[in-house]
Image (spheres, rainbow, N blue to C red):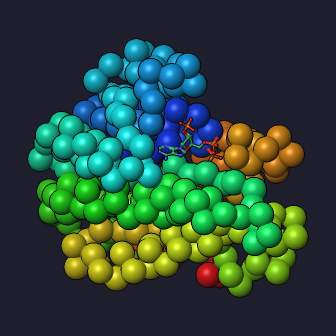
Amino acid sequence: MAAKTCNVLITGANRGLGLEMVKQMIAKPCPGRQIFAGCRNPEASKCEDLRELARKHPGEVHIVQIDTSDPRSVADCAKKVGPQLGKCGLNLLINNAGVMPHNTLKTITARDMQDNFNTNLLGPIMVTKEFLSYLQAASKACGKAGMSCKKSAVINISTLLGSMARTHETFYAFPVLAYRITKAGLNMLTVCNALEFKEDGILFVALHPGWVRTELGGQEADISPKESVEGMLRVMESLSERQNGAYLDYKGEVLPF
Ligand SMILES: NC(=O)c1ccc[n+]([C@@H]2O[C@H](COP(=O)([O-])OP(=O)(O)OC[C@H]3O[C@@H](n4cnc5c(N)ncnc54)[C@H](OP(=O)(O)O)[C@@H]3O)[C@@H](O)[C@H]2O)c1
């Protein structure tokens, strides 16, 4: 990640793309940087790789408990992390945590839809809302015009499956109704936030990581987490106010909403 980004929060960082982001960020030294790696159950065995990274990089990688589907957990996380951010504020928030249950209109229940909504859409809404004052502080502390991930930015990890314009190409392979709807909502959230906080100098972008071999993507997917995250970090480094509210993939290609 860009050398001057000092404070980063990534949700869902104990495995998959979130964990790979933490790994690749710490591989690029940056004095004073703090990475807050969110996971919902820090003591669980599935967080061991992240705990190992935190042990190796004390003071730089902080594991923070956050269940993005639970507004109280999100608020508690902001209360704990906020004071550790200092005058630098929060430079980069990556709303990465997500779930993809396999459902269609025939199989979905109201509960399935609500659960998926809570993680994939309410989660990013509440995390952004709770950390907004720290993002604003980061933008102010930077003191420069323009937008960037070094200054103050929210990256919403979206998916091509949230593109209405391209649904006809992907629907039969991946019907996943709730996932598509919640990610289309996440794209709308990105555009609305980009407009609402333009004057604050906070950049908002929706980013599709490609089809990646994680638990969510499955082993048949096109690319490795390493390739996806290398691409996404490259794209993040290149972002400016010109991409505020954009929907891009990990290669930087513009996707149609
Ligand atoms: N892989 C792909 O092909 C692909 C394609 C397009 C978009 N994406 C998006 O990329 C993001 C990351 O996906 P991934 O492939 O890395 O999936 P993954 O390997 O299944 O990892 C998902 C991560 O999200 C966390 N998570 C789920 N629900 C959560 C909650 N309520 N609170 C906090 N954390 C929660 C998981 O934590 P636990 O370990 O506690 O479950 C895990 O750390 C998702 O937003 C996904 O939609 C992935």
From the image, which quarter does the N terminus lie in? top left
For the question of whether residue 24 can be seen, the reply is no
Taking the spot 74% from the left edge, 48% from the top edge, the residue there is 217
Q: Residue at x 82, y 81 (%)?
A: 168
Say how many tags the image has: 0
Answer with left or right where residue 85 lies relative to residue 108. left
Left/right placement of residue 3 relative to residue 135 reads right
Question: Residue 169 sits in which quadrant?
Answer: bottom right
Is 180 or 56 nearer to us in this picture? 180
Residue drawn at the location 53% of the way across and 74% of the way down: 185
Residue closer to the observer: 215 or 36? 215
**Which quadrant does the C terminus fall into?**
bottom right
Residue 199: tell me if it is visible. yes
Return the x and y of residue 200 as percentages of the image width and height: 21, 73
Above or below residue 155? Residue 69 is: above
Q: Give the left or right position of residue 116, taking residue 141 as reference.
A: right
